[in-house]
Amino acid sequence: MGFNFSSKKQKEIKNLKLYLKNSFGFSPKKIELYQQAFTHKSAANDKLIREDNERLEFLGDAVLSTIIAEYLYKKYPLASEGFLTELRSRILNRNQLNKLSRKIGIDVFINSNEQDFNICESLLGNALEAFIGALYLDRGYKLTKKIFIEKIINNYINIDLLASIDSNYKGKILAWSQKVKNKIEYKVTKEILFNKRKQYIVQLFVNGQFIAEGYDYNIKGAEQNAAMLACEKLEL
């Protein structure tokens, strides 16, 4: 039994190293940091798993914010502080990070209780932030910035397109509803304690009919995400 467990773990480590090398072009010095980055707290109950990714997520969130702030500051030298802040927020939006995590294949390596995984997709974005935190500790800021910009931003996010999009989705929904005389309503349907923080799930209804659902760590953000998905569904 011990041998089989060891073989399985060695295979997982080998696959993780290959993923990091093939996807991002580097070899980790401390593979255990990346194992931790992809371990949700629901899977850290196992005595053989010592730590979850919450602390690395905290660190990665700060590192990402700095990387994007510097990147945008240099990319748009004449832009106002308000424009830069808004665009950074769009890039690091929870839904954006969740989608990005899937695109770069992180979801395959997340070690999580299956039920928790289905309840809250935010653990995808959290794992991406934890990965950045692990990369920062393992290889430093310079390589972390290079990898995130060259391997992730340049390949998966169109910054100029993102900058040109009107992100006031609630405003769009409101203008549309007034034009066609529909009644819109946002309802907080559930509150989840996730990563020691309360997360709100908000549903958007049009004339009493459910249209879309959004979630975030504050109600306004959840409403905005629900409105964004509704705009896509209604093709506004």
Image (cartoon, rainbow, N blue to C red):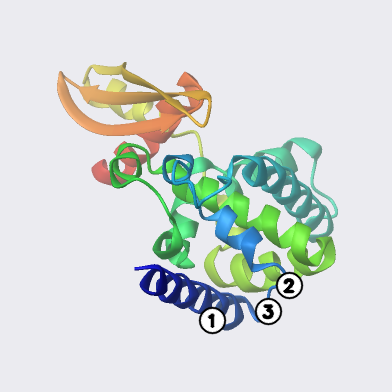
Which residue is rendered at x = 65% and y = 81% of the image? 25
Question: For mark 1, what is the residue?
Answer: 18
Q: Quadrant of the C terminus?
A: top left
Which residue is rendered at x = 72% and y = 44% of the image? 59
What kind of residue is marked 2? Lys
48 or 105, which is in the foreground? 48
Which residue is rendered at x = 72% and y = 39% of the image? 85
Compare marks 2 and 1 and give the one earlier in the sequence: 1
* Residue 103: quadrant of the picture: bottom left
Answer left or right for 223 relative to 146: left
Residue 97 x %, y %? 52, 50
Question: For mark 3, what is the residue?
Answer: 27
Question: For mark 2, what is the residue?
Answer: 29
Residue 119 x %, y %? 31, 37
Which residue is rendered at x = 61% and y = 57% of the image? 131
Looking at the rendered structure, which numbered label has been put on residue 116? none
Q: Is residue 160 above or below residue 186?
A: below
User: Marks 3 and 1, Cα distance to the nearest angstrom?
Assistant: 8 Å
Answer left or right for 146 relative to 128: right
66 or 165, which is in the foreground? 66
Mark 3 element type: loop
What kind of residue is marked 3? Ser
Q: Is residue 155 visible?
A: yes
Compare marks 3 and 1 and give the one earlier in the sequence: 1
What kind of residue is marked 1? Leu
* Residue 135: quadrant of the picture: bottom right
Mark 2 element type: loop
Q: Are marks 2 and 1 in contact (CB under 8 Å)?
A: no
Residue 186 x %, y %? 32, 18
